[in-house]
Amino acid sequence: MSAISKSNVTPSDAAQPPPVSLAWTMWGVGAIFYLLGFYLRVAPAVLADTLMVDFGITATALGNFSAFYFYSYALMQIPTGILSDSWGPRKLMAWGGLAAGCGTLVFALAPSIIWAYLGRLLIGGSVAVAFVGLLKLASHWIVPQQFAMVAGVTTLVGVIGAVLAGVPLQLAVTAFGWRAVMVVSAGLLFGIGLVIWLFVRDDPREKGYASYAHVDTPTEPQSLGQALRSVREVFRYRNARLLFLIPGGIVGPVLTFSGLWGVPFLTTHYNLSNTLAAALCTTLLIAWAMSGPLVGALSDRIGRRKPLYVLGCGLMVAGWSTLIFVPNLPLWLLVALLVITGAASGCMIITFSYIKESTPPQYAGTAVGVGNMGVMLGPMLLQPAIGWVLDRLWTGQMVGDLRVYSLQAYQVGFALMLAWVILAFVLILFTQETHCRQLVKGNFNSQP
């Protein structure tokens, strides 16, 4: 039973909306959990060479290690959406933080790659609840007109975590070793899980304020049959089906390059130091993060979703094509392309408002979970696939105990990223514009 039902508070009992400062503080506490999850998501880029040597693994194994995060993350998205609708975000994120701390500790102490896989799997499945939980929290605490902007700011906070996983992580690992750094990371996750449990509340009515939620969330956990019906109802709508496939082509290349293969590619074929290569990958993420809130706010302002998504996909096709197939770019041009491509990727944030507006409001959490699962399909499939290509095209070159892969091998592998971007560009053209309004009002008579 949720705290809302326990307190027996009705909307008429709470006429005033929550103070803006309180609403954003509630969101901010949960956002710290999302920041830590994003930090762990992209940490393998900096740790890549170290992990390959310490565990004695190939590119395929490294790709699988990184992708284990996304395997469990993606598989948890639909259950997360359903649980956010039934449990509420507080309970979901608190337990997620504690479980993520356990997974990080397993990874930090892993005696072999198998244990590292297990830790990574647990981390991904646990932090998977953060993004959907935050958006669910926002749908109750923050005015609906700011929902796309909130989604963008959430991504910005996450990418701050990715920034910490760049140069700062590289310096910390150099100074203290990767295992010690991961133990500290586990402690932070345990701490934030406890703080969420003690401080965060699912709905303003629990503190005597009016809620912005369209409909009351269920107060009892759904049965398996109800959960499957929720997913089935979301997929009845064409936009939901398309927006499940599209965002993987936007986020997949960004997280595959910045979160795993970008650093070894740049150090090998641009002769950059690990620190500078990590900084360039961070630049891609920062551009993505900075553009997200702007794109979300602009979309809300113009009352359109589709045009900005189409523009972003088009710019990404041009950017990734140049980065992949034009070798020996000047450093300034390389940086410029990473910034432009990253900024164009910010269009992905529209996914969550778009899919939420295209499906019944009582399935808001499930719909956002479907969209976020689509986001994670990109890195989940691309990271190990590119590792497999690199190993297939490996020429036998070694530097010490580390394999070195040719430019051609990277180009063939990265072409997989470009193919998905092109597919996303084509599919977005077939979506139906929502004009930033709820197309489905809670019945199933609207056109899918």
Image (tube, rainbow, N blue to C red):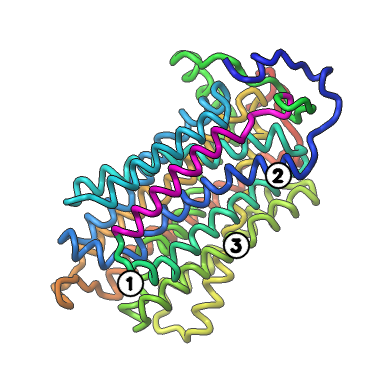
Task: From the top left corner, tell me how far across and down residue 39 is, in percent.
Answer: 45, 55
Q: Which residue is mark 2?
A: 24
Foreground: 292 or 279?
279
- Amino acid carrying label 1: it is Thr
Magenta stretch, main secondary structure class = helix
Q: Residue at x 45, y 68 (%)?
A: 168
Q: Which residue is mark 1?
A: 174
| Quadrant where the image shows the N terminus | top right
Could you tell which of marks 2 and 1 lies nearer the N-terminus?
A: 2
* Residue 54 percent coordinates (x, y): 19, 62
What's the CA distance linking mark 2 and mark 1? 36 Å
- Left or right: residue 71 versus residue 373 is left
Question: Which of disc 3 and disc 1 is earlier in sequence?
Answer: 1
316 is higher (above) or lower (below) than 86: below
Q: In the rendered image, is residue 366 in sight?
A: no
Give the magenta part as a residue range.
179-205
The picture places residue 239, in percent across and down from the top left corner, at 60, 36
SS label for mark 1: helix
| Mark 1 surroundings within 10 Å by alpha-carbon count, few (fewer than 14), some (14 through 19), many (20 or more) | few
Residues tagged 1 and 3 counted as in contact (Cβ below 8 A): no
Residue depicted at 76% across the width and 41% down the height: 435
Residue 74's place in the image compared with 16, above or below, is below
Asked whether the viewer can see residue 186, the reply is yes
Residue 340's spot in the image, x, y percent? 58, 70
Q: Is residue 391 magenta?
A: no
Q: Name the element at disc 3.
A: helix
Disc marking residue 344: 3
